[in-house]
Image (spheres, rainbow, N blue to C red):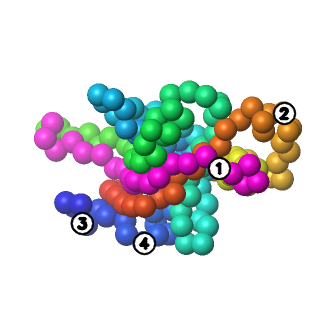
């Protein structure tokens, strides 16, 4: 990172930025261009490993691309505010963001409810949550095991 003075290095500082958000952009490898899509997410640390959770349909482009190559990148942004100035070159922005990479995979059936709980909690909803078995069967839940993560903040 070029601007070390804006880097967020402590895990808790990175997690604090992430807890402010409920949407992340995920980029998948595709044929000619990357495929990037905004998704709702949840997060949880398991045995020191940060896991990000996403839910959706059982079929679709995301799952097809994940099956071909599970390596993904993600970006989460918070606190974005433009700072105007009289001179264009003096304009700036205040922001907080987290970017990273990891491996995506389908969540095992026995962990699906816990992953969905994490997604719902990220929105600010409070459990306990009730799930209908039919909806669970129709829903795919996948996770990103985070390999690298960086935070950046300018206030």
Residue that carries the numbered disc 3 in the rendered image: 4
Q: Closer to the N terminus: mark 2 or mark 1?
A: 1
As helix, strand or loop, the secondary structure at mark 2 comes to helix
146 or 66, which is in the foreground?
A: 66
Residue that carries the numbered disc 4 in the rendered image: 10
Residue appearing at x 61%, y 60% in the figure: 44
As helix, strand or loop, the secondary structure at mark 3 comes to helix
Q: Closer to the N terminus: mark 4 or mark 3?
A: 3
Residue that carries the numbered disc 2 in the rendered image: 134
Point out the residue furthest to the front here.
Answer: 68
Residue 27 in the image: x percent, y percent? Answer: 40, 39
Q: Closer to the N terminus: mark 1 or mark 4?
A: 4
Residue appearing at x 61%, y 46% in the figure: 106
Q: Is residue 25 visible?
A: no
Residue 13 in the image: x percent, y percent? Answer: 46, 66
Residue that carries the numbered disc 1 in the rendered image: 107
Residue appearing at x 40%, y 53% in the figure: 101
> Would you say the residues marked 1 and 4 are in contact, meaning their CB atoms lie under 8 Å apart?
no
State left or right for residue 126 relative to residue 10: right
Provide the major secondary structure of the magenta segment.
strand
Alpha-carbon span between mark 1 and mark 3: 36 Å
Alpha-carbon span between mark 4 and mark 3: 13 Å
Foreground: disc 4 or disc 2:
2
Alpha-carbon span between mark 2 and mark 1: 17 Å
Quarter of the picture containing the N terminus is bottom left
As helix, strand or loop, the secondary structure at mark 4 comes to loop
Q: Magenta residues?
A: 88-111
Q: Closer to the N terminus: mark 1 or mark 3?
A: 3
The 10 Å Cα crowd at callout 3, few under 14, some 14 to 19, many 20 or more, is few
């Amino acid at each position: 990172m070029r601007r070390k003075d804006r880097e967020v290095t402590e895990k808790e500082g990175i997690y604090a930025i992430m807890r402010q958000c409920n949407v992340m952009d995920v980029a998948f490898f595709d044929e000619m261009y990357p495929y990037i899509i905004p998704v709702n997410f949840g997060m949880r640390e398991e045995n020191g490993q940060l896991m990000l959770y996403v839910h959706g349909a059982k079929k679709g482009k995301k799952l097809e691309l994940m099956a071909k190559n599970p390596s993904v990148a993600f970006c989460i942004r918070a606190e974005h505010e433009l700072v105007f100035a009289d001179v264009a070159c003096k304009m700036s922005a205040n922001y907080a963001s987290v970017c990273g990479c990891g491996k995506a995979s389908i969540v095992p059936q026995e962990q699906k409810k816990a992953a969905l709980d994490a997604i719902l909690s990220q929105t600010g909803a409070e459990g306990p949550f009730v799930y209908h078995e039919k909806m669970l069967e129709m829903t795919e839940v996948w996770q990103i095991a985070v390999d690298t993560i960086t935070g950046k903040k300018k206030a």
